[in-house]
């Protein structure tokens, strides 16, 4: 649109509208990017997460965002549990980040789908607002140096399992034993 | 010459701006209600089948709501 063809009043109205739209977009929080690949993982102890936060130093950390209402999350749990059991002794740490609003929903889900890896509930959505997962589930891999290595939205069964194994085994090479 | 913005345009601008601020993005982790079965258009197979039947009877076309189908009118 060529604004030079508008009269001064119309041009001013057009610019005011643009400013208004920009302000609206900012208030919806949609323009703020989350933590990017290569950035340090936020300090989990400062985010009001519910549950016992494990020691993540010098470990390959896998954060899996999930919710009890998410069907693919339920499908992913048995596979994630096997990964945790297979690699935990080698320096891999899987943490499930539950996004349920109600703790009772999480507890009911975990009773029906028992797992061995630790779960933290992001009740205040602070971690989610920093990492900005694109969907449920979304997995974040953090290298032993504490920096975000990769992000994996969705869970697609064996394809995802094989991708996770490749990443875990690659990152475990840099773990100091 | 002083260029004055008409009062009604200013009011309209303020109202639109205030309404715009009310927009809220639903984050992926807040979609519990939206992901509910009752929010799906295909939640009732019988109702959907009936709709499909009415559609191809009335419009002489079937399919095209997802996979397959082209509406040959032969069924």
Image (tube, coloured by chain):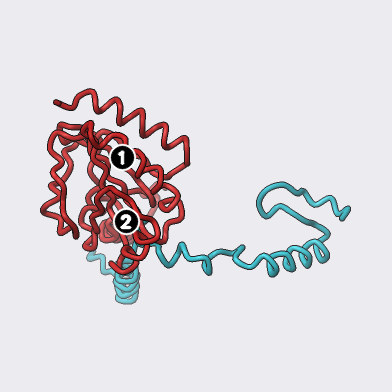
For label 1, the residue is A85
Residue at mark 2: chain? A
Residue A61, position in %: x, y? 23, 39
Compared with B54, A2 (above or below) is above
Tell me which corner region of the image, top left, top right, bottom left or bottom right, holds residue A166: top left
In whole angstroms, how far apart are the C-alphas of marks 2 and 1?
A: 54 Å
Is disc 2 in the same subunit as disc 1? yes
Quadrant into which the C terminus of chain B falls: bottom right
Does residue A10 lie above or below A5 as drawn? below
The chain that appears red in the image is A
What chain is tagged by disc 1?
A
Seen at 31% across and 69% down, the residue is A104
Q: Earlier in the sequence, mark 2 or mark 1?
A: 2
Chain B tint in image: cyan
Q: Position of residue A17 (x, y in %)?
A: 33, 60
Residue bearing mark 2:
A18
Tell which of A67 and A2 is nearer to you. Answer: A67
Report x, y in % for residue B40. 55, 64
Q: In percent of the image, x 46 and y 55: which residue is there?
A: A71
**Element class at badge 1:** helix
* A90 lies above or below A62: above
Estimate how packed mark 1 is, as few (under 14), some (14 to 19) or many (20 or more) residues with alpha carbons within 10 Å. some
Please, which residue is most extreme toward the right here?
B74
Quarter assignment of residue A101:
bottom left
């Amino acid at each position: 649109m060529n604004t030079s063809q508008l009269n001064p009043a119309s041009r001013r109205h057009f610019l005011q509208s643009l400013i208004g739209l920009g302000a609206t977009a900012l208030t919806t929080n949609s323009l703020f990017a989350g933590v990017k690949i290569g950035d340090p993982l936020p300090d989990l102890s400062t985010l009001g997460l519910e549950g016992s936060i494990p020691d993540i130093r010098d470990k390959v950390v896998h954060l899996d965002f999930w919710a009890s209402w998410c069907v693919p999350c339920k499908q992913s749990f048995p596979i994630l549990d096997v990964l945790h059991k297979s690699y935990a002794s080698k320096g891999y740490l899987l943490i499930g980040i539950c996004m349920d609003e109600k703790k009772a929903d999480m507890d009911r889900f975990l009773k029906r789908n028992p797992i061995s890896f630790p779960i933290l509930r992001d009740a205040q959505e602070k971690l989610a607002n920093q990492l900005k997962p694109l969907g449920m589930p979304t997995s974040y891999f953090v290298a032993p140096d504490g920096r975000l290595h990769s992000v994996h939205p969705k869970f697609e069964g064996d394809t995802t399992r094989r991708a996770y194994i490749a990443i875990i085994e690659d990152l475990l090479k840099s773990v100091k034993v | 010459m002083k260029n004055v913005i008409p009062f009604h345009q200013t009011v309209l601008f303020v109202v639109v701006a205030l309404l715009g601020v009310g927009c809220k993005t639903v984050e992926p982790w807040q979609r519990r209600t939206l992901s509910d079965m009752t929010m799906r258009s295909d939640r009732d197979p019988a109702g959907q089948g009936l709709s499909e039947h009415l559609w191809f009877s009335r419009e002489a076309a079937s399919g095209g709501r997802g996979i397959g189908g082209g509406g040959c009118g032969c069924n």
